[in-house]
Image (tube, rainbow, N blue to C red):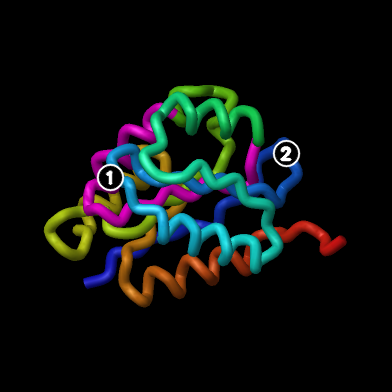
Amino acid sequence: MSTTTETTPSPATTGDGSTVVVAGAMSDSHTWGLVFLQLLLEEHGHRVVNLGPCVPEDLLIGTVRAERPALVVMSSVNGHGYRDGMRAITGLRECADLADVPVVIGGKLGIHGEQSADETVGLMAAGYDAVFDDTPEGIVTFRRMLTSMPQRAAV
Protein backbone atom coordinates (compact mmCIF):
# COMPACT_ATOMS: atom_id res chain seq x y z
CA MET A 1 0.00 0.00 0.00
CA SER A 2 1.43 3.34 -1.01
CA THR A 3 1.15 6.12 1.52
CA THR A 4 2.39 9.05 -0.53
CA THR A 5 0.64 12.21 0.60
CA GLU A 6 1.09 15.65 -0.81
CA THR A 7 -0.13 19.16 -0.77
CA THR A 8 1.24 21.67 -3.21
CA PRO A 9 3.88 23.64 -1.32
CA SER A 10 3.76 27.38 -1.89
CA PRO A 11 6.99 29.32 -2.30
CA ALA A 12 8.23 30.95 0.87
CA THR A 13 7.35 34.59 1.27
CA THR A 14 10.95 35.70 0.79
CA GLY A 15 13.81 34.37 -1.29
CA ASP A 16 14.03 34.08 -5.05
CA GLY A 17 11.30 31.46 -5.44
CA SER A 18 13.56 29.04 -7.27
CA THR A 19 16.12 27.86 -4.71
CA VAL A 20 15.67 24.38 -3.27
CA VAL A 21 17.66 23.06 -0.32
CA VAL A 22 18.35 19.31 -0.44
CA ALA A 23 19.50 17.50 2.70
CA GLY A 24 20.17 13.94 3.72
CA ALA A 25 18.76 12.71 6.99
CA MET A 26 21.10 13.11 9.96
CA SER A 27 21.97 9.41 10.22
CA ASP A 28 22.05 8.74 6.47
CA SER A 29 25.47 8.73 4.77
CA HIS A 30 24.20 7.89 1.28
CA THR A 31 25.00 10.46 -1.40
CA TRP A 32 23.76 9.13 -4.75
CA GLY A 33 20.10 9.91 -4.04
CA LEU A 34 21.03 13.47 -3.14
CA VAL A 35 22.98 13.88 -6.38
CA PHE A 36 20.00 12.51 -8.32
CA LEU A 37 17.66 14.94 -6.55
CA GLN A 38 19.96 17.85 -7.31
CA LEU A 39 20.11 16.95 -11.02
CA LEU A 40 16.34 16.46 -11.19
CA LEU A 41 15.67 19.78 -9.49
CA GLU A 42 18.16 21.60 -11.73
CA GLU A 43 16.50 20.00 -14.75
CA HIS A 44 13.26 21.60 -13.52
CA GLY A 45 14.93 25.02 -13.44
CA HIS A 46 15.78 25.32 -9.77
CA ARG A 47 18.97 26.50 -8.10
CA VAL A 48 19.97 23.78 -5.63
CA VAL A 49 21.85 24.04 -2.36
CA ASN A 50 22.81 20.42 -1.66
CA LEU A 51 23.88 20.03 1.96
CA GLY A 52 24.88 16.41 1.41
CA PRO A 53 24.45 13.46 3.77
CA CYS A 54 24.28 13.36 7.57
CA VAL A 55 23.01 16.94 7.88
CA PRO A 56 22.89 18.17 11.48
CA GLU A 57 19.86 20.15 12.54
CA ASP A 58 21.76 23.40 13.14
CA LEU A 59 23.25 23.35 9.61
CA LEU A 60 19.82 22.71 8.09
CA ILE A 61 18.19 25.51 10.07
CA GLY A 62 21.02 27.96 9.36
CA THR A 63 20.96 27.24 5.63
CA VAL A 64 17.18 27.51 5.36
CA ARG A 65 17.29 30.77 7.29
CA ALA A 66 20.03 32.17 5.00
CA GLU A 67 18.61 30.93 1.68
CA ARG A 68 14.84 31.29 2.27
CA PRO A 69 14.26 28.55 -0.32
CA ALA A 70 11.09 27.83 -2.24
CA LEU A 71 11.36 24.26 -0.95
CA VAL A 72 13.38 22.04 1.39
CA VAL A 73 13.70 18.38 0.35
CA MET A 74 14.73 15.89 3.04
CA SER A 75 15.84 12.49 1.78
CA SER A 76 16.56 9.13 3.38
CA VAL A 77 17.85 5.87 1.98
CA ASN A 78 18.88 4.03 5.15
CA GLY A 79 15.39 3.51 6.57
CA HIS A 80 15.69 5.92 9.47
CA GLY A 81 14.05 8.83 7.66
CA TYR A 82 10.97 8.86 9.86
CA ARG A 83 12.95 9.29 13.08
CA ASP A 84 15.48 11.72 11.58
CA GLY A 85 12.77 13.53 9.67
CA MET A 86 10.72 14.14 12.80
CA ARG A 87 13.73 15.68 14.50
CA ALA A 88 14.52 17.90 11.49
CA ILE A 89 10.98 19.18 10.99
CA THR A 90 10.53 19.83 14.70
CA GLY A 91 13.66 21.98 14.69
CA LEU A 92 12.57 23.88 11.58
CA ARG A 93 9.00 24.46 12.77
CA GLU A 94 10.19 25.69 16.18
CA CYS A 95 11.72 28.66 14.33
CA ALA A 96 8.92 31.17 13.84
CA ASP A 97 10.76 32.82 10.93
CA LEU A 98 10.81 29.50 9.03
CA ALA A 99 7.18 28.52 9.56
CA ASP A 100 6.22 29.42 5.98
CA VAL A 101 9.05 27.51 4.25
CA PRO A 102 7.67 24.41 2.50
CA VAL A 103 9.40 21.18 3.53
CA VAL A 104 8.92 17.72 2.04
CA ILE A 105 10.45 14.36 2.89
CA GLY A 106 10.86 11.20 0.89
CA GLY A 107 12.69 7.97 0.37
CA LYS A 108 12.97 4.94 2.57
CA LEU A 109 11.51 6.32 5.76
CA GLY A 110 11.28 3.10 7.79
CA ILE A 111 13.19 -0.14 8.21
CA HIS A 112 10.12 -2.39 7.88
CA GLY A 113 9.36 -1.91 4.18
CA GLU A 114 6.60 0.42 3.07
CA GLN A 115 5.83 3.29 5.38
CA SER A 116 2.55 3.07 7.24
CA ALA A 117 -0.31 5.50 6.92
CA ASP A 118 0.24 6.38 10.60
CA GLU A 119 3.86 7.37 9.88
CA THR A 120 2.77 9.55 6.98
CA VAL A 121 0.09 11.22 9.10
CA GLY A 122 2.65 11.76 11.87
CA LEU A 123 5.12 13.42 9.51
CA MET A 124 2.43 15.67 8.05
CA ALA A 125 1.14 16.58 11.52
CA ALA A 126 4.69 17.48 12.56
CA GLY A 127 4.88 20.03 9.74
CA TYR A 128 5.90 18.41 6.46
CA ASP A 129 3.99 19.73 3.45
CA ALA A 130 4.30 16.41 1.63
CA VAL A 131 5.59 12.89 2.28
CA PHE A 132 6.80 10.73 -0.61
CA ASP A 133 7.53 7.05 -0.25
CA ASP A 134 10.12 5.22 -2.33
CA THR A 135 7.61 3.50 -4.60
CA PRO A 136 7.24 4.34 -8.30
CA GLU A 137 4.01 6.17 -7.40
CA GLY A 138 5.89 8.28 -4.85
CA ILE A 139 8.46 9.29 -7.45
CA VAL A 140 5.76 10.21 -9.98
CA THR A 141 3.97 12.29 -7.36
CA PHE A 142 7.20 14.08 -6.42
CA ARG A 143 7.89 14.91 -10.07
CA ARG A 144 4.32 16.17 -10.49
CA MET A 145 4.86 18.50 -7.51
CA LEU A 146 8.05 19.83 -9.12
CA THR A 147 6.28 20.68 -12.36
CA SER A 148 3.72 22.71 -10.39
CA MET A 149 6.40 24.88 -8.76
CA PRO A 150 7.62 28.17 -10.24
CA GLN A 151 10.93 27.89 -12.08
CA ARG A 152 13.63 30.47 -12.46
CA ALA A 153 13.96 32.12 -15.83
CA ALA A 154 16.57 30.67 -18.15
CA VAL A 155 19.46 33.08 -18.65
Q: Viewed as shown, does residue 111 lie left or right of 56?
A: left
The N terminus - image quarter:
bottom left
**Residue at 48% across, 50% down:** 73
The C terminus - image quarter:
bottom right
Magenta region, residue range: 68-91
Residue 106, above or below 29: below
Q: Earlier in the sequence, mark 1 or mark 2?
A: 2
> Where is residue 97 shown, x and y percent of the image?
59, 24
> Where is residue 56 shown, x and y percent of the image?
39, 30
Residue at numbered disc 2: 15
- Say whether residue 138 is magenta: no
Q: Which three-letter amino acid code belongs to the residue tagged 2?
A: Gly
Which mark's residue is nearer the viewer, 1 or 2? 2
What numbered label is drawn on residue 122?
Answer: 1
**Crowd tier of the residue under label 2, counting other residues whose Cα lies within 10 Å: few below 14, some 14–19, many 20 or above:** some
Report the number of numbered marks. Answer: 2
**Residue at 32% across, 46% down:** 29
Residue 63, above or below 103: above
Q: Quadrant of residue 150?
A: bottom right
**Residue at 55% across, 58% down:** 38
